[in-house]
Amino acid sequence: MKIIGISGSIVGSKTRIAVQQTLNNIIEKHPDFEVELIDLGDYKLEFSDGRSYMDYTGDTKVVLEKIMEADAYIIGTPVFQASIPGTLKNLFDLLPVNGFKDKVIGIVVTAGSSKHYLVAEQQLKPILSYMRAVVVPKYVFIEEKQYDRKIIVDDDIIFRLNRLANELVNTTDAMQQVKKAEEEAFFF
Amino acid sequence: MMEQYRIDENKGLELGLYTLGDHTTDALTGKAISERQRIQEIVAAAKLAEDAGLDVFGVGESHQPKFITSAASVVLGAIANATERIKLVSSATVLSTADPVRVYEDFATLDLLSGGRAEIVAGRGSRLGAYELFGYDVRDYEELFEEKIELLMKINESDRITWAGKFRPALDDMEIFPKPLNGKLPIWRAVGGPPASAIKAGRMGIPMMLTTLGGPSSAFKGSVDAYRMVAAQSGFNPAELPVSTTSLMYIDPDSQKAFRDYYPYINHLMKELRGSYYPKEQFAEAMSVRNALLVGSPQQIVEKILYQHEMYGHNRFLAQIDVGGLPYAQVEQIIDLFASEVAPAVRRATAKK
């Protein structure tokens, strides 16, 4: 089973730190899961032009193939202009419409203000649902004041990221059972 | 009514095969046959289709990994030489990245070689390989095709051509050689996806070849209706315009065995060419007569083709069999079943006299 953490913007560090911390929780408690961090800042992705994901080249192809092969994701997003960053939306646009079918996703959000709390609920989740993902219902919303010098210091967030990691792993396991049941439901 | 497209409605629905010329590993063994063997098996399948009494054989064109018939008209030339009666079509020609003059020369030659059996099905291509290879910008996707199909139609309709456009040097009172056997070629428009492309075919008053690969058959009815409606509004008689459909097909005398044996291949095809697997729940829907994907016993295939014929009133159906590295022995068996058990029943039920 493979879980990929996606840090959804090319600038800043808070989102990457939150995603990495969630991945660390998974490594610690569920060593049988393989994890990898994809920080969009480390790759140069083309803009989506509607072609099949297999037909891109370079970094774009590398990232898309890694994502298509994984079983679950932690998607980390900052809030830009009251929405998800264009870099993250572009990643979704690059993937096939059913790109997250049978895949499980947990979300972490970083923002400068609590007034952005519903951005993920109202703008990110509908995209993931359209792409057929199973989304862990509760996401973790982190504000700048909960960090200190690149470390998450708020215990509430630390506990929540732990819970998110566990829920993601358990839901991923459950999804394997669902897939197995679907596979076995047919004679072919 | 459809003489200019060489279709005799009295004989009922025309039945044939087409290949995309995909060249992948075998779903079960993981091994691929050689390029030479794959091409030879395509020619052999066409010969068998003729011997078994099918009406049409199509060869598709793609220019990228996992495909082998980039020079589809050359393969059709070999088939012309190996056969005597079966109609030869492209399925489809990627006209957007080709020179319509060259395409016409190729197919007029094929028409002479084959004794008047060549047809062009012109499409925009559903893959990007040709655009990158020949240096066309996919942002011109629509404009490229519309300009080139207009030129192709013009070549078909007049002896001397004067024409100017954006994507090809102008032609000033030029004549194209050779001429097709009977002066004209049937030229179709390849249509897939939403009705927009079907509407364009209707507006130009040219025959439509529509892909109906899976999902509910009723979903494609909108495209057929829109095509005929727009053709009529544009001053053409829909009764003179043939419609062809295409779909994936697998037949076995035992229906359950057909589903069991086919699933790994259709799943492999999707994984190889589209990078996503074929969900079993979706495949299982093909057990319903109302689903477009043709899998099952000969009787089930007959029922499904007739169900679709009732709905679309189409004139030709082409089946794609050789997918996912399916061994040639199985391709042969399916061609035999299609020709000997499906075709006679379908023709009896759809013939006008």
Image (spheres, rainbow, N blue to C red):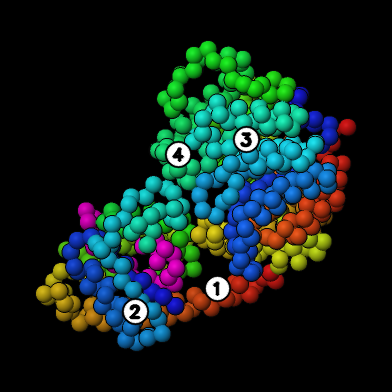
Mark 3–mark 1 distance (CA, rounded to whole Å): 41 Å
Q: Dot 3 corresponds to which residue?
A: B121
Q: Which mark is residue B134?
A: 4
Magenta residues, as a range?
A: A63-83
Nearer the observer: mark 3 or 4; the answer is 4
Compared to B235, does B16 lie above or below? below
Q: Are marks 3 and 2 in contact (CB under 8 Å)?
A: no
Work out which quarter of the rendered image holds the C terminus of chain B and state it: top right
Identify the secondary structure beneath mark 4: helix
> Foreground residue, B263 or B45?
B45
Q: Position of residue B226 (x, y in %)?
A: 60, 33
Q: Are marks 4 and 1 in contact (CB under 8 Å)?
A: no
**Residue A69 within the segment the image draws in magenta:** yes
Q: Amino acid at mark 2?
A: Ala
Instruction: Give the crowd class for mark 3: few <14, some 14-19, many >=20 residues within 10 Å.
Output: many
Q: Residue at x 45, y 31 (%)?
A: B143
Identify the secondary structure beneath mark 3: strand
Q: Are marks 1 and 2 on the same chain?
A: yes
Q: Taking A163 as reference, is B284 left or right?
A: right
Q: Dot 1 corresponds to which residue?
A: A179
